């Protein structure tokens, strides 16, 4: 280790981390090329060839030319994922209880409405309520 000074170790580590960061950016650009629905197939192929044949220049030009669109597509995808997740939670929470037909509070509200209208007797209401809460 005497022939490789500490400053050279730091310099090598800096270049290694910069290379790793560039690889992440390259993969981000390539995924953005395929994710963009506004671009036609030929434009996607052109950008991809440009980024593969001249990787440093291709990535730099892509980020300069289409960087604002990259962030907009990221935000759009994040919002879509969040909406899908919230929808899944609502569906899952809404199907618990009462045999999967609705939540127990909805079933109790429906039973109370039937009792108020006189469609069921108070005894039938109590039996149905006990069945829903069981």
Image: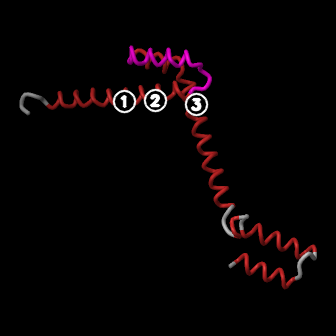
Place of residue 106 in the rendered image (x, y in percent of width and height, measured from the top left): 77, 66
Q: Please state which of residues 84 and 25 is positioned toward the viewer in this rendering.
A: 84
Q: Nearer the viewer, residue 45 or 32?
A: 45
Alpha carbon separation for disc pair 1 and 2: 11 Å
Would residue 98 be found to the left or right of residue 13 on screen? right
Quadrant including the N terminus = top left
* Residue count near mark 3 (Cα–Cα under 10 Å), binned few <14, some 14–19, many ≥20: some
Which one is in front, 69 or 124? 124
Q: Main secondary structure of the magenta part?
A: helix
Give the magenta range. Answer: 36-56
Instruction: Identify the mark nearer the N-term, 1 or 2.
Output: 1
Residue at the disc numbered 2: 28
Q: Is residue 58 magenta?
A: no
Q: Determine which residue is flagged by label 1.
A: 21
Taking the spot 67% from the left edge, 56% from the top edge, the residue there is 91
Residue 68, image x, y percentages: 56, 24
Q: Position of residue 126 (x, y in %)?
A: 80, 82
Residue at 82% x, 69% y is 110
Gap between marks 3 and 2, in whole Å?
12 Å
Which element is circle 1 on? helix
For residue 54, side relative to residue 32 (left or right): left
The earlier-in-sequence mark between 3 and 2 is 2
Can you identify the residue that label 3 sits on? Answer: 73
């Amino acid at each position: 280790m005497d022939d490789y000074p500490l400053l050279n170790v730091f310099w090598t580590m800096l270049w290694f981390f910069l290379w790793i960061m560039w690889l992440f950016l390259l993969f981000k650009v390539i995924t953005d090329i395929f994710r963009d629905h506004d671009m036609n197939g030929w434009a996607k192929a052109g950008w991809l060839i440009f980024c593969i044949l001249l990787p440093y220049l291709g990535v730099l030009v892509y980020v300069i030319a289409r960087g604002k669109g990259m962030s907009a597509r990221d935000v759009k995808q994040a919002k879509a994922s969040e909406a899908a997740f919230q929808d899944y939670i609502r569906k899952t929470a809404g199907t618990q209880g009462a045999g999967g037909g609705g939540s127990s509070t909805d079933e109790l509200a429906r039973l109370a409405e039937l009792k108020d209208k006189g469609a069921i007797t108070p005894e039938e209401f109590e039996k149905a309520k006990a069945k829903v809460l069981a």
